[in-house]
Amino acid sequence: MSSSGWKIYSFEDVTINHDKRRKPLSSKEREKMKGIYPYYGAQGIIDYINGYIFDGVYLLIAEDGENLKSKKRNIAQLAHGQFWVNNHAHVVTSNHLSDIRYLCYVFNNSDISGYITGSAQPKLSQANLNSIKFVLPPLLEQKVIADTLSCFDDKIELNNQINRTLEEMAQAIFKSWFVDFEPFQGGEFEDSELGRIPKGWRVGTIGEFVKDMKNGGTPSRKIENYWCSNDVPWIKTGEIKNSLIINSEEYISNEGLKNSSTKILPYNSVLIAMYGATAGKIGLLKFEACTNQACCAMICNSANKAIFLYLHLLNKQSYIESLAVGAAQQNLSKDTISKLTLIIPNDDVIEATQFNEIFNCIENNLRENQQLEIIRDTLLPKLMSGEIQVPLKEVQ
């Protein structure tokens, strides 16, 4: 494949715009329309409703929002099947000059900052979207590049599907064993403050169940050498998202660690966000790291116990979130979390769950996805510039 035949196009030259078909729905309207069809906003699915206005494969591009400038997430995404879109995402399909998958890749790999207006509320208008210039190869070459990059995305999505199934399995085991007590129905039960429980089990607090609980801390931002190295991963509340945590967005130096209240946490620490919009969100730390003061870490003496606690907290999350106080900013206290009660099975019962094996598989898939993303993102600009060439015969 060569770069001959590559041409400069405006976005409107290679797409068909469907923005007129969009229809925003208020949260109250969506509440009355709960269903199975995705309802998209600027950055992805925000709800599921009982109707759709699009059917097929479309490219959705954020029309407004902070992410247009920060680009912490992709601005463009493909939507497949039957779905609804509000007025915060542009909706386009490709024409005879373009491959819709290629357009998605090239859009997310391009600097469009010059087309974004507004500071308080960044916006990409339809007129500015249509005027964006791209250098595109002939259609067949676009398909070759898209096929190559899609191999990585397809594997990533397969791993994500496997992980969703594994997480559902873990939740099902937790409910069967520790909510419904199904494996223990033939044995003896006794009364407790939380109802009937298998004999020999007990009701206790999270503070009694865990080995230790720790709040984090933040090294001084004014001292540059506390933040100028990648010595120690440092977790913030925004990274706690009811999921496994396999990396961090920021690092501090060993000197910064030494001169702050934060401490290194072990693998399989259970984290809970204590302040702000994410208060009550849960995470399972899959590497050694420290946290800021808005996180509380719970340390258990075995992997299966840590995952048991993680699943228990997810199961009680709505209640935990209801305990947050504060008008301007919701917050929880370590004391509040420590005093939460739970049913504590015998150690041998928890160790028999095989939670750790399930979550090891989830972690391995996440780490594989991380590597696939690095390889894909390294190849992407080289393929799109023609620096790396893929033989056309591969798609003929």
Image (cartoon, rainbow, N blue to C red):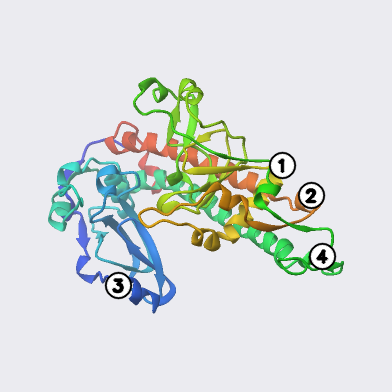
Which residue is tagged 1?
A: 302
Q: Give x and y (percent) for residue 202.
A: 77, 58
Q: Earlier in the sequence, mark 1 or mark 3?
A: 3
Q: Give x and y (percent) for residue 273.
A: 49, 48
Which is more foreground, mark 1 or mark 3?
A: 1
Mark 4 → mark 3, Cα distance in angstroms: 47 Å
Residue 77 vs residue 313, the one in the foreground: 313
Q: Which amino acid type corresponds to the residue marked 2 in the rendered image?
A: Asp
Which is more foreground, mark 4 or mark 3?
A: 4
Q: Which amino acid type corresponds to the residue marked 3 in the rendered image?
A: Leu
Q: Earlier in the sequence, mark 2 or mark 3?
A: 3
Relative placement, left or right, of 377 versus 2 is right
Mark 2 → mark 4, Cα distance in angstroms: 15 Å
Q: Earlier in the sequence, mark 4 or mark 3?
A: 3
Quadrant of the rendered image containing residue 213: top right
Q: Earlier in the sequence, mark 2 or mark 4?
A: 4
Relative placement, left or right, of 60 versus 361 is left
Q: Which mark is residue 184?
A: 4
Mark 2 → mark 3, Cα distance in angstroms: 50 Å
- Classify 10 Å Cα crowding around label 1: few (below 14), some (14-19), many (20 and above): some
Quadrant of the rendered image containing residue 8: top left
Which residue is tagged 3?
A: 25
Which is more foreground, mark 2 or mark 4?
A: 2
Q: Earlier in the sequence, mark 1 or mark 4?
A: 4
